[in-house]
Amino acid sequence: MRRPTLYLRLAQCLVTERGFCTSASKNGNDKIIASVVFERLPVVIPKIDPAVYAFQEFSFRWRQQYRREYPEAFLKKSDSR
């Protein structure tokens, strides 16, 4: 396993002097009190079921074919409320 050596190297980097950081305090030799390491888990998106995909395609095509276009006068009446 290589993870323990990776963690050991990471810990050594965190413990060593922070020469590359800019410090907000006047004294640049402050020690690190705490550190946090976050691991981003991979995002797994399942494949869409063929029946669901077929329905989405059908629904999209139905809406494209039979959508209603309302007159501008009708749409402006709802804005005047």
Image: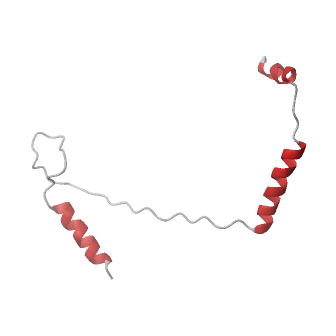
Which residue is at a point 24% across and 56% down the rendered structure image?
34
Residue 62 position within the rendered picture, expressed as x and y whole percent measured from the top left: 87, 50
Q: Residue furthest bottom?
A: 1
| Residue depicted at 84% across the width and 23% down the height | 72
Can you tell which quarter of the image residue 11 is in?
Answer: bottom left
x and y percent of residue 37 in the render?
33, 60
Residue drawn at x 53%, y 63% as measured from the top left: 43
Q: Quadrant of the C terminus?
A: top right
Q: How is the image coloured?
A: secondary structure
- With respect to residue 18, does 52 lie above or below? below
Q: On the rendered structure, is 69 left or right of 24? A: right
Query: Which residue is drawn at the image coordinates 86% and 20% (left, top)?
Result: 73
Total numbered labels: 0
Q: Nearer the viewer, residue 62 or 41?
A: 62
In which image quadrant can residue 14 be found? bottom left
Q: Give the vertical position of 59 relative to 23 (above or below).
A: below
User: Can you give x and y, in whole percent of width and height, for residue 59 in the image?
Assistant: 83, 53
Q: Residue furthest top?
A: 80
In this rendering, position of residue 3 left or right of residue 60? left
Camera-nearest residue between 68 and 41: 68
Side of 47 relative to 9 (left or right): right
Position of the N terminus by quadrant: bottom left
